[in-house]
Each structure stands twice: as C-alpha cells, then as structure tokens.
Amino acid sequence: MKNGLLKPGDYFLRGNYAFVEGALLAGCRFFAGYPITPSNEISAMMARRLPQVGGAFIQFEDEIASVVAIIGAANGGVKSMTATSGPGFSLMQEAIGLAFMIETPIVIVDVQRGGPSTGLPTQVGQGDFIQANFGSHGDYETVVYLPNSPQEMFDMAIKAFNTAWRYRVPVIVLADQMIGQMIEKVSVPSHDEIELVEYEKPEIPPEEFLPFDLRYEVPPFVAAGDGYRIHLTGLAHDERGYPTTDHETYSKMLLRKLRKIWDNADEIVEWEERLTEDADLIVVSYGITSRSVYKAVSDAREKGLKVGIYRLKTAWPFPYKRLKELAMEGRNILVVEVNMGQAYRVARQYISHEGVYSMPWAPGRVPPPEAILKKIEEVYKA
Amino acid sequence: MSEAKLIRPSIDEIKALLRVERLPHIWCPSCGIGIVAKAYVEALLRSGIPPEKHVLVSGIGCSSRMPGYIKIDGYHVIHGRAIPFAVGLKTVRPELEVTVFAGDGDLSTIGGNHLIHAIRRNDDINVIMINNFTYGMTGGQYGGTTPEGSRTLTSPYGHIEGTFNVPLLVASIGAPYVARWTVLHYRQIVDTIVEMFKVDGFTFLEVISPCIIYTDMNRRDAISLMRMFKNQSEIDHTADLRNVGIERLDEETRFIVGKFVHRPSESYQTKYRKLVERVMKGGE
Ligand SMILES: Cc1ncc(C[n+]2csc(CCOP(=O)(O)OP(=O)(O)O)c2C)c(N)n1
Ligand code: SF4
C-alpha cells in the first residue's frame, strides 16, 4: 500500500489506521489536525499517506484552525476531515455550527478519552455523546456514528463521507481510545463494491443558481472557482446566501436545514439487535462498552436470564423507534456507558414506562462483564 | 508602467463586480472600508485573473462584511478564523487567488495565532487588514491595535495596554510582502493589491481607516482624523519597521506608510506540491 489505496483483502489493523484507509478509499484528500492523544495515529498516518495519493496534509496551530481549514477545503470541492479528542473537540464547536449553517460536508473523528478538561489523555471515555450534537450554540444537527471495532472504523469512515456529502452536514465519528488503538482483523472489499457519494458540479446556469435554494431538500453544492460566484455566510441568510433578519425567511431556512436530518432519520439511523425477541431486559450500549456487554449478556443467557442487546451505531439521529417498540412491548431497558448516563437520558425521553435503568461508569476503564452481569441481575429482579 | 498610462476601470466594469442588489451597504457615513473595497475591485480587474478565479474570505466585523458586496466567490466565516479557511481552500485549489479581508480585531487579536502561523508556514494567501484601532462592529471596545490613552467602551478611563506594531510583527516572522497605507492612498492600495496577487507566499496589507465610533469616543470627527492621515503620513518604503508602530493617536503621530517588504518567496503550497510529486514517484 505504499502508493495508492489499500487493496482488497484481510488485514490486521489498528482502529485509527483503519479509519485512515477507509477515509482515503472514500476519497478524502485533505486532512488538517492538531496532535492529541489518543487520536495521534490518525494524523501521523494521514501525513504519510495523503501525499502518496496526491492529497494534502497540514498540521495546524490548533483545533479551531484545523476544523475551519477543512471547511475551507471542502468548499473547494475536496473531501476533507480532521481527527481529535475531547479538548480539541470542544475547541471545534463554534465551527461545527458554521459547517451546518453553510451546509459544508466535513468529517470529524473524535477518539474519545476520559473527561472533563484534560481528564484522562490515555484512557477511555464516552463522555462526548451529548456534545456531539449539542456542543455548538443554536439549533443544528449532526450525524454521529459509533464504531465498536477497527472494522467499523473502516466502514464508518466511508459512511461518514457519504452521509456528509449526501446531506451537506458535519458528520462526527465518535470512537474511543480503545476502539482507536486496538488491533483487529479488517476486511477491505473490492474497490468497485464501495459505493461513494461524489461531488458533481451542478448543471444549473449561474444566473439561476441559489446556494440555499428552498425548493430542494439538499440544494446542489458548488465549490469555489466553479463559476457560480456564490456568497456564503454564517449569518442568518436567504436563498441567495445574503444576510437577513426577516423572521419568516430565516425560520424557513433553518427548518429546511434541520429537516435534512429529521426527515431522513429513518434512512440514517443504525443499530444492532441481538436476542431481543424473547428478552425481558434489553441492554443498550455503544462503542467499546458494547464489547463488554456482549460477554455479560451471553453469561446472563447461560444463567437463564432473558436478556437482549441493542447496540447504538448512530448516536444522532438516535435510533429510538425500534427501541421504543421493544420497550413498549413490556421490556425493561438498561443503558451501560462510560459516562454518567448521557445515552440513558436520551433513551428516557422516548420511553414512558419506569423500567429504564442506567449503569453509569466513570471514565478510565470499561465496565467489566462481571460488573455488567451483576447490574443485569439486579435490574432483572426489579 | 507609469500611473498616468493606466486606464482606470469604468463605473460599469466596477458595478459588474458588485452585488448592487445588496446596496445600501451597512457601513457608516465616513467609514473607510468602502474605499478599500473599491480598491480591491479595481486591483482584481487589473490582475488579469478572471473574477471566477478570485475568492474572498472574511471573519466577523464591519470590515469582514466586505465580501458580501463583491460578486465573486465569497465566504464570510467566523470571528478570527478567515485565515485557516483560506489556507484550507488554497491548499486544495491552488489555481484560485484567495484573499482574506478583515478587521484588525479579527486578524490580529482573536485571530492572532492563525496570522503568525500562516506567515511562518508562508501560506500562499493575501491578507488585507483594515486597521481602525477598535472593534467597530461591537461598538468600540479596545483590541490589540488600540493606541494607548484611547477611550473605548472597555477602557473608559483611557487605554493602558500596549499596542501591536503589526507591520513589524508580520515582517519579523518572515512575511515576503508587507505594506501599509491609509485609506487616502487609494492608488497605492490598488497597486499594492495587484502586486500581492503575484507573490507566491503570504502577503499582507494594513490599511489605516477611520471609524466613526472610535473618533467619536475620542472626541474627534472623522474628517479631522482623515486630516491627520493626510498631514501626518510619510511614505518610506525602507522604513525601519521598529519605528512604525502607532502607539498613540495625536498631532505628534507619524503614520509611516509604504511597501515595506517585497522579497522572493516560495509558498508552503508550492513546496507541498513538490513534496507530493516526489512521494508519488516513490521517493521518501
Ligand atoms: C467568537 C466571537 N466572539 C465575539 C464576537 C463578537 N464580535 C463581532 S465583530 C467583533 C469585532 C470586530 O472588530 P474588527 O475585527 O476590528 O472589525 P471592525 O468591525 O472594526 O471592522 C466582535 C468581537 C463574535 N462574533 N464571535
Ligand atoms: S462602526 Fe466604524 S468600522 Fe464599522 S461601519 Fe461604522 S465607521 Fe465603519
């Protein structure tokens, strides 16, 4: 793989490297970033790999510059990404709002570590779950993926670029220290099996073109230099991209942008379900925690407890419909995560019965299967 | 080419590059930003590069509203971050002529870190900084360029902090092109911007400009400030940049202007392209 893209086949890859190879196969040709553990393997590999495929890499002075630079590069029509962890992700929040506002497709991978603040730089956390969709001010939407293996780091890298360019939104991949740094088998499919959403210059003549055309769910994207002479602004704007304070105009514009995600949530959401049919209790988890949950649930089954698995593969949109269905048929829900109950709070919003439980866990360690099993037994009795 | 022989663009040519449907603009009467906007348009017309290949990027502030009136690709991003946006764009689309247009607060205060690092990397972008000594848009607070003694919203008893000497700052980091004019030096601003387009590397132009808010708070009218610019400015292309700081604003102030630095340069983007060629051929 010295030059060119990773060939089809099976590899033994670190999660962070798998993400890089997936991103390059998806067509990513610009990376900007600032060093931070435990995401460093991504920028190091991008610095090595991008020139090999004709792309560009810049290590910037901070994460604000990094995320803004990928917004600039994406507006040049080039698929672009950055990688970071908690402190850097916090610095990026203002610009994520800009990307939403000017409908610029970008991909951010946040390899989560323990927070808050500098927290636990080398240890695992899942505390950015809420921030990934609510960290910037105002109403906006992101799409957030939750990989639980190096294979999914690879797959979701591709998916992230496709979703970003299909809906023109910021897409975040919320990995975690363990998923990013563990080494596992990764299968790379033949390249023509990989479906890609590509940027194509629209056919509309420039005189008729409106960058924020309300007649579209997702208006066609044009890049700088395409000859459309567009104006994009983070200020509230009309269809032409011109600033406005007219309430009706702005509410229509804001709602159109939000609806790209709201109306397509069923298409976008992903989850994994195991052993739910006969289950009395469903364990919800995501990322590295789900790996511990798999073991705990199989141990519980061996003990005769009817327990199922509902693993979130997207955090936002939250895949609530099926979960709600399962819960409303009389099943209890237990949410296990390496934070103080962020996904639990979201699940609770959708489920109106009392049987929704939380297993919070402080960052630094993943709850071991035995601890989860104990909690399952405790909740099962209730 | 002597100045006299230049054919100035017609009003129609200039209008074709304005978003006339957006007029009237938001700037106050006697604000200097519009003068520089027109100078940019004239320079663009003179550049020989088609308008489709020029891009403007700005931050937030009165100055940063300028791209909104110019009919070329323009990106009005977030406060202090125009430079990294421009760098990302220029890196992936090297054929575009990317110019940042923003205020002193945006570029030298909140965005100061990006400014110094873009110069250190020698990114191939043009930066035009309107220096009105204050934050105009938010009503006249002090920033990194506010002269000592100034009264501002947030220094009501007189400003006691130090002041950036911006030309010295950018030149000392190695910017290959550094110039400063006041808004009264219209012809020179146009010439300078035309030259900036030709440099492979980071080019910087500071334009000293009146702001009605600043002058009001300091009990001056804009005309008297313009008179100061006229009577107290000196063109000195070879000035010792240690002496060009504007630390106070009064009858003693000397506004040293000119094209201070113009040296050969190879930008980060050019070097990176060479690196990619080398690596793609199999080099390490
Ligand atoms: C992150 C952030 N902080 C603060 C502001 C508020 N703000 C808007 S414009 C501005 C100052 C602009 O001053 P300058 O860049 O000097 O431009 P001028 O208005 O003087 O042309 C500030 C602080 C903002 N928009 N974003
Ligand atoms: S506040 Fe100052 S900088 Fe802003 S438009 Fe008015 S005069 Fe110009």
Image: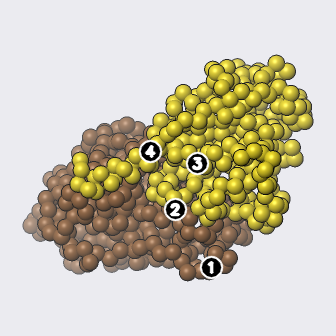
Q: Residues within 10 Å of mark 2 (few under 14, many from 20)?
A: many
Nearer to us in this view, A350 or A58: A58
Q: Amino acid at mark 3?
A: Lys
Identify whether B127 is placed above or below B88: above
Q: Position of residue B237 (x, y in %)?
A: 68, 29
**Amino acid type indicated by mark 2:** Asn
Both marks 3 and 1 on one chain: no
What whole-number distance in Å separates the C-alpha atoms at marks 2 and 3?
A: 23 Å
Viewer-proximal residue among B28 and B197? B197
Circle on res. A75: 2
In the rendered structure, which amino acid carries the disc numbered 4? Tyr
Mark 1 burial class by Cα count in 10 Å: few <14, some 14-19, many 20+: few
Residue B31: x percent and y percent? 82, 44
Name the residue tied to disc 1.
A205
Mark 4, chain letter?
Answer: B
**How far apart, in angstroms, are the residues tagged by discs 4 and 1?**
35 Å
Horizontal side of A240 relative to B281 (left or right) equals: right
Between A66 and B250, the one nearer to me in the picture: B250
Q: Which residue is mark 4?
A: B268
* Colour displayed for chain A in the image of the structure: brown
Query: Drawn colour of chain B?
Result: yellow
Q: Are marks 3 and 1 in contact (CB under 8 Å)?
A: no
